Image (cartoon, rainbow, N blue to C red):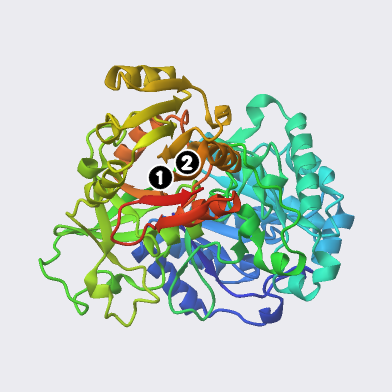
Amino acid sequence: MKALIKVGYGCNDHCTFCHTLDVRHVEGEAAEVHAKIERAAALGHTMVVLSGGEPTIRPELVRWAEHVRSLGLGFGLVTNGRMLRYPELVERLGAARLEYVYLSLHGGSAKTHNLMVRSEAFDETVAGLRNVAAHAARQRARGQPFDLTVNCVITRHNVEHLRALVELVVPITEAKLKLSMVEPKGGADRSFEHLVPRVAHVGRRVAEALDHGRALVAEGARTLDGRSRLLHGGVPLCLVPGWEDAFDDLRTHGFRSMVEIGEADFFPVDDLNKVQPSACEGCTLRGPCPGLYRAYEASFGADELQPRRDGTRGNSFDFVAERIVRKDLPEAITTETCPVRPLGITPWDHARDLHVRHGPRLVRFRAEGRDASDAELTALRTRSGQLYLDVSETLASSDFSKDLRAVTRSPICAACEDRPRCSGLFEVSSEDVFSRDDARVRERLSRITGDVLDVGCGELRYAAELDREDVRYVGLDPDEARLATLRSRMPRAESRLGTADGIEDDAAFDVVLVLHAWNHVRDPEDLVRRARRALRVGGRLIVVDDQAFALLRSRPRARRAHAAQTLAFEHHRLDDAEACARRLAAGGLTVTTQLEVAAGTSNQWIVEAVR
């Protein structure tokens, strides 16, 4: 768990795209950096990484590294590598537990790199890279960890010259290579038209360069510490086909929080500088994808994106127990005795950190996975309130009413002046929201009569409500085993093997049901067209499904559940009631009921429409 500390913004390079172009004169006091190192240790970080500007030009560098080591933490650098050309400096930092280097190199030749950094820096940077790689090899030979990444920022100046960089770095087997789209910030924002290439073109060139890198090395040399040595960042995943799993950013490097010069405390590493526009809705890559830089989207829009609709996603995301923060909470807690505020307000991520009171304990849960975006996790915590503690004893929760307990924001947060800035205190509820909300579905189904088509009838959760004399039931499902269960439980029913695209009926049904199958259907627009045609005039389409939710789990429990997970019936989308209603209306049906998920409800929604 890394903390990133900026030590100042002065630098011995003059990069055209520099994020901190306008504050290069600002340097941090040595005492300020020293105190922030101690704060990082108090927050539970296991490594401190210094950045700038250029941290290696600071005379306090070795002293800071030794202070980090004295606190029992690993030490790292984000650097241009020029000062690391001196072997004695690398040795002194190595003695102070240097374990991580993120080194900038923007071209495979002096001409390209020096143009990018506006300095005669290429030879010095490459010498620094080779020194660090040699040190990393010695560390690994002793069984000690070392992480070396070479990062290339891509602008209009080097986008056509990536192969040469690949050919320089890939043979250095201790290094990973990352190709990063320039962020329109600082110098790149000021010279936007001159520097920022179109992202689709960057995606093509990145994929070509990484393909070339893969061809250069033997199979066994393509990975390092279990990850690909060939990485990319800042490019939407839909634009780098074949390299979707090679996305890399601060979070994949284990950074949790960071602090700039002059800031009083740490802030979480987040994705607020990026956006997933409306074109990304329904894309199955949405969880791990970085999206577009906001400034890029504001200038160029999102027409270059190529959203994927052919994959699947899970609709539950894990928050994993990370640390028991306290074990002695009193029975009654007030705003004045809140256990979260003394931890500090700003370091905690409003999307991914959860402090939960469970009896006398305060437990911190963390969502590290990239199966959900920050925006999706934030919506679960705030708008829909779909957080649940998993108390089941089996690998897969089969009865939510027994296996899950709702987790809600503590009432003491309501009157707290820090609420807008704080990630909050959460508590475990004993209310069974699942049985309560499922009862309204059962009541609705118990009133239907006539000819009924159940699309994706599945495990017959509502057989008791549908197996009646006044219901002529037809069950459609792609799983023969489930249809066999249907025939044994409902002998009067008709069963059909197939998916939604097999519905060929004309005005044959009074009701079409899609119960917990809507998001499993590959083409919902086609389903709506076929369902409308299959309904008689005045007939109803009733859709019930589950919105995305988050499970709070222990680390062993999460590990076992993921090992047993199957994607056989996963979701093609994560539509909520509003998205479903829009699709029904666009298909020519009149929406009459739209029951949304919200804080205090379960994750089950209902939409009903009439032909």
Which sits in the foreground, 602 or 298?
A: 602
Q: Secondary structure at mark 1?
A: strand
Q: Residue furthest right?
A: 111
How many numbered tags mark residues here? 2
Residue 124 figure quarter: bottom right
Q: Which residue is mark 2?
A: 518
Residue 559 figure quarter: top left
Q: Residue 410, relative to residue 526: is it above or below? A: below
Three-letter code, disc 1: Asp
Q: Which residue is mark 1?
A: 545
Residues under numbered marks 1 and 2 in contact, where contact means CB atoms less than 8 Å apart = yes
Q: Secondary structure at mark 2?
A: helix
Which sits in the foreground, 358 or 187?
A: 358
Residue 256's tag is: none
Who's the residue at 60% across and 49% down the image? 248
Q: Residue 432, relative to residue 508: is it above or below? A: below
Residue 161 lies left or right of residue 371; in this view the side is right
Who's the residue at 32% across and 83% down the image? 417
* Residue 573 location (% of width, % of height): 52, 44
Three-letter code, disc 2: Trp
